[in-house]
Amino acid sequence: MAKGLSAIKLERFFEIDQIHRTREHGFKLKKNFSNSGIRHYFFSERVVSRWNSLPPDAVESQSINGFKSQLTKLRRRKMGYFMDS
């Protein structure tokens, strides 16, 4: 979605965070805060923290296979990253 490779538009679920950080990737998503416990379980809320914590190598991959390869490397180093908490 971030690279426009999906029929679903990124803006439908997410908002790009406009605060630029120098050592992180440039596709940070804005985290919405809500007092409602229901919203906490929405797909668009559950994935933001994980996406934002991905290394630049993964997010800036030029292809889906490159992205998957970076996720595999991350999984080997940090398996808990892929577990629901």
Image (cartoon, grey):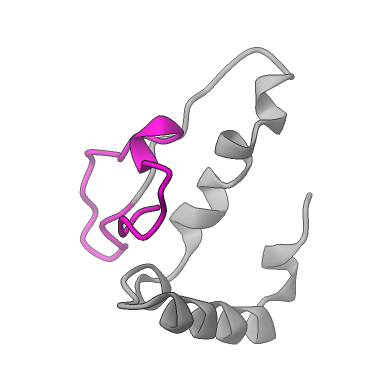
Q: Is residue 46 above or below residue 60?
A: above
Q: Position of residue 79 (x, y in %)?
A: 73, 75
Q: Position of residue 5 (x, y in %)?
A: 36, 60
Residue at screen point 27% across, 66% down = 23
Magenta stretch in the rendered image:
1-27
Left or right, 41 with respect to 28, comes to: right
Q: Position of residue 70 (x, y in %)?
A: 49, 82
In the image, 21 versus 74, the foreground residue is: 74
Numbered-mark total: 0
Q: Is residue 39 above or below residue 10?
A: above
Q: Is residue 42 above or below residue 59?
A: above
Q: Position of residue 66 (x, y in %)?
A: 42, 83
Left or right, 71 with respect to 13, comes to: right
Snapshot quadrant of residue 15: top left
Snapshot quadrant of residue 14: top left
- Going by the picture, which residue comes out furthest to the top? 35
- Going by the picture, which residue comes out furthest to the front? 7
Magenta stretch secondary structure, dominant: loop
Left or right, 13 with respect to 84, comes to: left
Left or right, 10 with respect to 72, comes to: left
Residue at screen point 51% across, 45% down = 48
Magenta span includes 37: no
Q: Is residue 2 above or below residue 37?
A: below
Residue at screen point 55% across, 36% down = 44
Magenta span includes 9: yes
Residue at screen point 58% across, 47% down = 47
In the image, 38 versus 77, the foreground residue is: 38
